[in-house]
Amino acid sequence: MRNSQSTRRTPDRKRAPKPAYDRALDLLARRAHFAAELGAKLRQRGYTTAEVESAVERLTDGGHLNEGETAHMLVRSLKRRGYGRRRLELDLRRRGADEAAASAALETVGDEDELERAGSVAARWRATHPERDAAALARHLERRGFLPRTIGAVLFEAADDAVAEREMQGQSSC
């Protein structure tokens, strides 16, 4: 019994602070970060600018920190979750993505892909909100980060589908 008590950590005993590099590795183990985002988190934890810059440089040189790869991963993730180009741009900027990396990642977002994703989001929304009007759908798509031209195309397509459905019902009743 005495052995188990001696190995317990006492609450008032403090650990030596981790070096900035080790803390950064801990953060990267949880998820990918951009250099600016990682630097901000390290500074929040009390590391000096010199320590942060050294850690970020070391991580970049070691291949642990890759702006381009992180930007592509974020764009893929947000696309899968049904977000539009505007939201992708804003999230990349908010997280501090390098301009070149953000531009390269956004090049993978084509107009056809965007329209297809918006159509899919609209179909899911309509299935759960059948009583809502087109204006409510437009606001939903806008909040998801779709561009106005994409929203217009989705609404126009939905209107065409509704007209075709009414015509089909009219023909089948004759």
Image (spheres, rainbow, N blue to C red):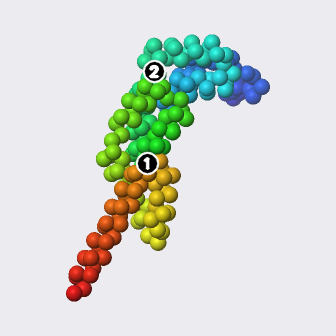
Q: Is residue 122 above or below residue 8?
A: below
Q: Quadrant of residue 79?
A: top left
Q: In the rendered structure, which amino acid carries the disc numbered 1? A: Leu
Q: Do we see residue 8 in this rendering?
A: yes
Q: Is residue 4 above or below residue 108?
A: above
Residue drawn at (49%, 57%) of the image: 140
Label 1 belongs to which residue?
A: 147
Label 2 belongs to which residue?
A: 64
Element type at mark 2: loop
Placement of the C terminus among the 4 image quadrants = bottom left
Residue drawn at (43%, 25%) of the image: 100
Residue drawn at (46%, 54%) of the image: 141
Placement of the N terminus among the 4 image quadrants = top right
Q: Can you name the residue that lies furthest to the right here?
A: 12
| Viewer-nearest residue: 41 or 169 | 169
Q: Earlier in the sequence, mark 2 or mark 1?
A: 2
Element type at mark 1: loop
- Residue 60: give x, y in percent of width and height: 47, 17
**Label 2 to label 1, Cα distance in Å?**
34 Å
Q: In the rendered structure, which amino acid carries the disc numbered 2? A: His
Dot 1, how many residues are within 10 Å of its Cα: few (below 14), some (14-19), or many (20+)? some
Residue drawn at (35%, 64%) of the image: 158
Residue depth check, mark 2 versus mark 1: number of the one nearer the observer? 1
| Viewer-nearest residue: 154 or 21 | 154
- Residue 143: give x, y in percent of width and height: 51, 52
Dot 2, how many residues are within 10 Å of its Cα: few (below 14), some (14-19), or many (20+)? some
- Residue 85: give x, y in percent of width and height: 43, 43
> Number of labelled discs?
2
